[in-house]
Amino acid sequence: MPPTSRTDEQLIEANLAFYDSLWSGASLVEAQRFNTWPLVQTLVEHAGDRLEVAPGMRPRLPIAHTHFVDLSAPAVGHLREHGANAVVGQISALPFADATFELVCALDIVEHVDDDERALAELVRVARDGATLLLSVPLHPSRWTAFDDLVGHRRRYEPHLLNALLARQGLVVEQSAVYGMQPESSRLLDFGVWGLTHHPRFAAWLYNRVLMPIGMHFQKPLALSVGLIDVAQVDEVLLVCRRQARPDTVAVAHSAQRAEALTAFADAPPV
């Protein structure tokens, strides 16, 4: 099943429609409850300023001392209620200066935008030389399903193209692991798509109140390996990347991108 062809505006609409509804009735799940927490603990110990992009109500970094950016106003509102430093924004126009953060987390997000090269460049721009970038993406276009369309995905990645994308941005994969909580059963996925399409409020309630807690209970420990794991049979991968120093020519381009991002943020209405 091929991906539905959508413009960036259509992707934003699809993502807002799905996630605003999902997060409006959701409770915050703290970072300590996810299988990423042992890794995050280690990374936080060695990082100063940190950023998480598109956490929704499931942040993987601690609320305290982390900056959050999310497209969903309901998610940002809920995060603020819990004391988070959170703003509404897009991954392709982050409202921060160059080289601000030592740790940047962006899980399940770059596959949602049309221009993933720009999105990744923005993450790199706001990261300092030597910073850690924690990323996750779905793999293998051949595994595309109606669920990918429903949740606002633009693509799944061929592993060799993902490697090339990371390399162009000066990112080196230091560790990786199998990741994600998507059920393996195609029938369960089809049922989820049907429910979210025909009974979205009930399906969102069921996910937030029943399925998510069950999934959290049965999480497997994160099994990190050095470098990039064999992803031939992997649906989604978690990547721990290191930002390398960038050439001056790229830095100039990133500075121009930063100015555009800050201008757009300054002109945006308050939430």
Image: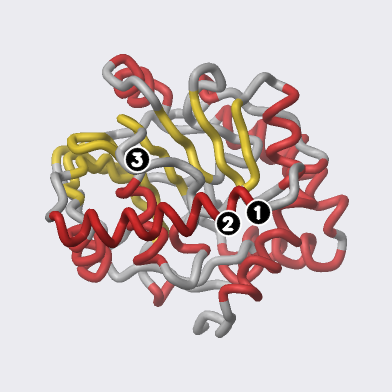
Disc 2 versus disc 3: nearer the observer: 2
Crowd band around label 2 with a 10 angstrom C-alpha radius: few (<14), some (14–19), many (20+): some
Q: Residue at x 40, y 41 (%)?
A: 97
Q: Which of the marked residues, 3 or 1, is nearer the chain's N terminus?
A: 3
Q: Label 1 sits on what residue type?
A: Asp
Name the residue carrying label 1: 267
Name the residue carrying label 2: 264
Horizontal side, residue 58 vs residue 82: left or right: left
Contact between labelled residues 2 and 1, with CB atoms less than 8 Å apart: yes
Name the residue carrying label 3: 134
Quadrant of the frame with the C terminus = top right
Give the quadrant of residue 50.
top left
Contact between labelled residues 3 and 2, with CB atoms less than 8 Å apart: no
User: Is residue 104 at all visible to an observer of this figure?
Assistant: yes
Q: Position of residue 91 (x, y in %)?
A: 49, 54
Q: Residue at x 16, y 51 (%)?
A: 246
Q: Give the Cα separation between the discs numbered 2 and 3.
A: 26 Å
Give SS at disc 3.
strand
Q: Label 3 sits on what residue type?
A: Leu
Horizontal side, residue 23 vs residue 179: left or right: right
Give the quadrant of residue 39.
top left
Q: Position of residue 158 (x, y in %)?
A: 30, 70
Q: Label 2 sits on what residue type?
A: Ala
Q: Give the Cα separation between the discs numbered 3 and 1.
A: 29 Å
Q: Residue at x 29, y 34 (%)?
A: 223
Q: Residue at x 47, y 59 (%)?
A: 260
